[in-house]
Amino acid sequence: MHVVLYTHSRLPVHGYGGTQRVVAWLARGLVALGQRVTLIAPAGSAIPEARVTEFETREMARTGFNLDRLVPGDADIVHAHAPLPTPISCPLVFTLHGNRHQAKSADGNTIFLSADHARRHGGTAFVYNGIDPAEYVYRTEKANYDLFLGRLHSAKGYRWAIEGAKLAGTRLLVAGGWRPSLRPSLRFVGSVQGERKAALLANAQCLWMPALWDEPFGLTLIEALMSGTPVLGTRRGALPEIVSPEVGALGDTIDDLVRLRAEIEQRDPAACRARAERWFSHVRMAEEYLRMYQHYLETRRLPPGRVIP
């Protein structure tokens, strides 16, 4: 199958760029499964797994811009990871990577990131994100700190993580960029990526993710699990689908999280890694998207997503 991936962001991304990295991992997974991939992306994009067709972002604002001309004639399907600026003639599916602010039923070609994400938008088709295990460090011996990794936004629950770690008596590293702290048990390390982020994830005793909004997926969850690090979080959005009892613990209040933190170190790093490798690798993600593509091409409908155990 010849799959065309479309994104309005240049690849590879500089910085965190969760959605952009998922697109690159999907291309890698599809090629590993024997598929051909073309990437339509802004000028300057380059990933080794795909033939890249570039466009200048400023062209999109011009009258007469035609994205359809960039789609190869032998393409089987276009998979958009951002809204298309113009219609195309090729069969099209679209992955929604965030939450829509207005209640609106999903279009019939929309793929979501989890069962909860799909349900809240009136759909049933979803594919869990996947990451390349080779980009993560797996460690069974942990250092003396917990980790919060993500945007320092109230919805991400970083204040809960700070308060909860304080009440639990654990040292917390907050990665996401903000300011230094003078409190000995709390350290801000700023934005992290690449090898530094992989090391922080692998060495942490647990990842705090006390989400206070409905997470469509939560990429840092599987990054932690792939590193052998259990997760401590809330029961919001996709978290209950991703974090099973053997790899983490979920609660509803700060008091719940403090109580659960006392037992989180009993989780086996090998179980964390095994769950991530089985269900949340880039190849597994590509397999599920191929199932979506094939069903859509045959029926012009998407199949329901598959909830993992």
Image: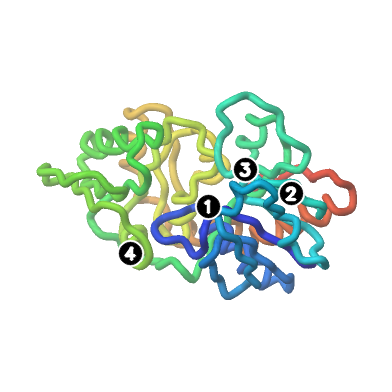
Mark 2 lies on residue: 93
Say which amino acid is labelled 4.
Ala
- Mark in the foreground, 4 or 2: 2
Residue 23 position in % (x across, y down)? 58, 58
What kind of element bears circle 4? helix
- Earlier in the chain: of badge 1 and badge 4, it is 1
Crowding around mark 1 (Cα neighbors within 10 Å: few <14, some 14 to 19, many 20+) is some
Q: Is residue 281 visible?
A: no
- The mark that comes first in sequence, 1 or 2, is 1
Camera sees residue 90: yes
Question: Residue type at mark 3?
Answer: Leu
Is residue 63 rendered to the left or right of residue 210? right
Q: Nearer the viewer, mark 1 or mark 4?
A: 1
Please tell me which of labels 3 and 4 falls first in the chain.
3
| Type of amino acid under label 1 | Thr
Residue 261: x and y, percent? Answer: 33, 41
* Measured Cα–Cα span from mark 3 to mark 4: 30 Å
Per the image, the residue denoted by label 3 is 96
Quadrant housing the N terminus: bottom right
